[in-house]
Image (cartoon, rainbow, N blue to C red):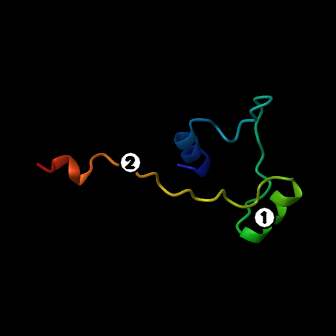
Amino acid sequence: YSWSELLKRLFEFDILVCERCGGPVRVIAAIQEPETAQQILNYLGLPSRPPPITPARYERRFHPDDFAS
């Protein structure tokens, strides 16, 4: 499978088809350096850092006192 086919299977939409006009999308670059990606995103006014990871919520299902006699 090509990378675009794998992404299509994962995200259930074709990343090589324009969502506005339905025409083909042309790949112009593959950015591999994080600093370069951050500069491009900053230039475009898009978030360049991932959102903070929130801690998992703890849901108490029982308390030890529930079993005391």
How far apart are the two marked residues, 2 and 1, measured between alpha carbons? Answer: 37 Å
Which of the numbered marks, if any, corresponds to residue 59?
2
Residue under numbered circle 1: 38
Residue 39 image offset from top left, x and y in percent = 83, 65
Q: Is residue 19 above or below residue 2?
A: above
State the SS at label 1. helix
> Which residue is pictured at 77% across the width and 58% down the height?
29
* Dot 2 and dot 1 residues touching (CB under 8 Å): no
Other residues around mark 2 within 10 Å, as few (<14) / some (14–19) / many (≥20): few
Q: Nearer the viewer, mark 2 or mark 1?
A: 2
Is 55 placed left or right of 52 in the picture? left
Given residues 60 and 26, the one toward you in this image is 60
Amino acid type of the residue tagged 1 in the rendering: Gln
Given residues 20 and 55, the one toward you in this image is 55
Given residues 48 and 36, the one toward you in this image is 48
Is 50 placed left or right of 27 in the picture? left
Amino acid type of the residue tagged 2 in the rendering: Glu
**Quarter of the image where one finds residue 25:** top right
Residue 2 image offset from top left, x and y in percent = 57, 50
| Of callouts 2 and 1, the N-terminal one | 1
